[in-house]
């Protein structure tokens, strides 16, 4: 039986690259038949990574059959996985997010959740000396994942281990980190082809805040102006997305990678209140700038209050 390796819905670079890395490891090092999969179309940065390193885009999983063996990476949240994930035979979880209740396995499995910025960093540590056998494209995927998740080490989630692994990979690949990261972020910033609805779901997590379901969306960019120019249309699309996704509110944070700040769109008094009590912000219009806020995992979600 082939083991399917996949990350979360709305796949970013880490949820696209890490399944590829781990499937390579299972196939080539462990001798376990494995296949990387996606739970949706990857974002523009992930597509750039695939093209740059000549990697095949994994198939999109449209149906998860019962009893399929799976390894889950870059999430452990059932809300971000196929609806019938409970019918699968989960054989492993590799993640760097907070532990969320809801998954049930059929027996003891290997779970590796570490407080690092990127799943690929955890995989690098797990694979160990066998990295010597990894082809260039697999190492390139790992480097891409780390630079993306750390925002080239700007994110407060970055650890020394993430830095060290990224530099080791870059040295091995003879890649200049600032130059390659700039290319990654330029690809991430080009979202002109996406509708407002697609943008609101592009990098989005469901979060239950004291019984209120929120959709917390983040758009990371080196060029926030084009996104902010669409703020009226983005806010107009929020009620429809909220209704379709059974959310009370959609929170959209536009993260300026270079200036290291986030702009929160404020479509109504509820979001205004959330901004004020969560971040101590003074809100006077339909946007508010939050200096130093860059990480949903470490700075946004933990601080949310109503």
Image (spheres, rainbow, N blue to C red):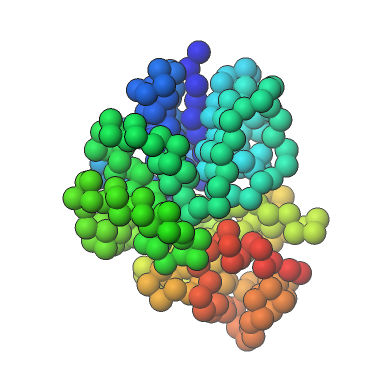
Q: Nearer the viewer, residue 192 or 104?
A: 104
Q: Residue furthest top?
A: 1
Q: How many marks?
A: 0
Q: Residue at the location (69% across, 22% down)?
A: 106
Which residue extends farthest right? Answer: 211
Which residue does the image show at 61% across and 59% down from the upper left? Answer: 216
| Left or right: where 85 falls relative to 115 | right
Considering the image in quadrants, where does the C terminus appear? bottom right
Percent x, y of residue 134: 29, 33
Residue 222, given in percent of the width and then of the height, sits at 36, 68
Left or right: 109 in relation to 262: right
Taking the image as shown, residue 181 lies to the left or right of residue 146, namely: left
Q: Position of residue 223 (x, y in %)?
A: 36, 70
Q: Quadrant of residue 269?
A: bottom right
Q: From this viewpoint, is residue 21 visible?
A: yes
In the image shown, does 93 or 196 lie closer to the viewer?
93
User: Which residue in the rendered view is the most extreme toward the front?
Assistant: 129
Residue drawn where x is 45% and y is 37% of the image: 126
At x 36%, y 54%, the residue is 164
Is 28 placed above or below 172 here?
above
Residue lying farthest to the left in this orientation: 174
Q: Quadrant of residue 242?
A: bottom right
């Amino acid at each position: 039986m082939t083991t399917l390796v996949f990350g979360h819905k709305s796949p970013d670079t880490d949820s696209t690259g890490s399944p590829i890395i781990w499937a390579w490891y299972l196939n080539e090092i462990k001798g376990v038949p494995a296949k990387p999969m996606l739970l949706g179309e990857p974002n523009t940065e992930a597509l750039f990574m695939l093209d740059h390193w000549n990697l095949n885009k994994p198939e999109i999983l449209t149906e998860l059959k019962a009893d399929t063996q799976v390894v889950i990476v870059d999430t452990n949240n059932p809300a971000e996985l196929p609806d019938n994930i409970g019918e699968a035979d989960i054989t492993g979880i590799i993640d760097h997010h907070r532990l969320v209740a809801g998954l049930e396995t059929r027996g003891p499995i290997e779970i590796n959740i570490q407080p690092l910025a990127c799943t690929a960093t955890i995989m690098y540590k797990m694979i160990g000396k066998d990295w010597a056998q990894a082809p260039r494209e697999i190492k390139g995927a790992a480097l891409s994942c780390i630079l993306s998740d750390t925002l080239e080490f700007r994110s407060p989630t970055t650890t020394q281990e993430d830095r060290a692994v990224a530099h080791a990979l870059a040295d091995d690949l003879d890649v200049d980190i600032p130059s390659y990261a700039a290319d990654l972020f330029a690809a991430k910033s080009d979202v002109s082809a996406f509708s407002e609805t697609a943008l609101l779901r592009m990098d989005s997590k469901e979060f239950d805040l004291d019984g209120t379901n929120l959709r917390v969306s983040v758009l990371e960019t080196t060029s926030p102006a084009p996104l902010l120019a669409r703020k009226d249309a983005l806010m107009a699309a929020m009620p429809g997305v909220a209704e379709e996704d059974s959310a009370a509110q959609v929170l959209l944070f536009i993260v300026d990678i270079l200036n290291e700040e986030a702009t929160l769109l404020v479509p109504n008094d509820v979001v205004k209140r959330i901004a004020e009590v969560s971040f101590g912000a003074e809100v006077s219009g339909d946007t508010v700038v939050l200096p130093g806020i860059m990480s949903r995992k470490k700075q946004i979600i933990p601080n949310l209050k109503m």
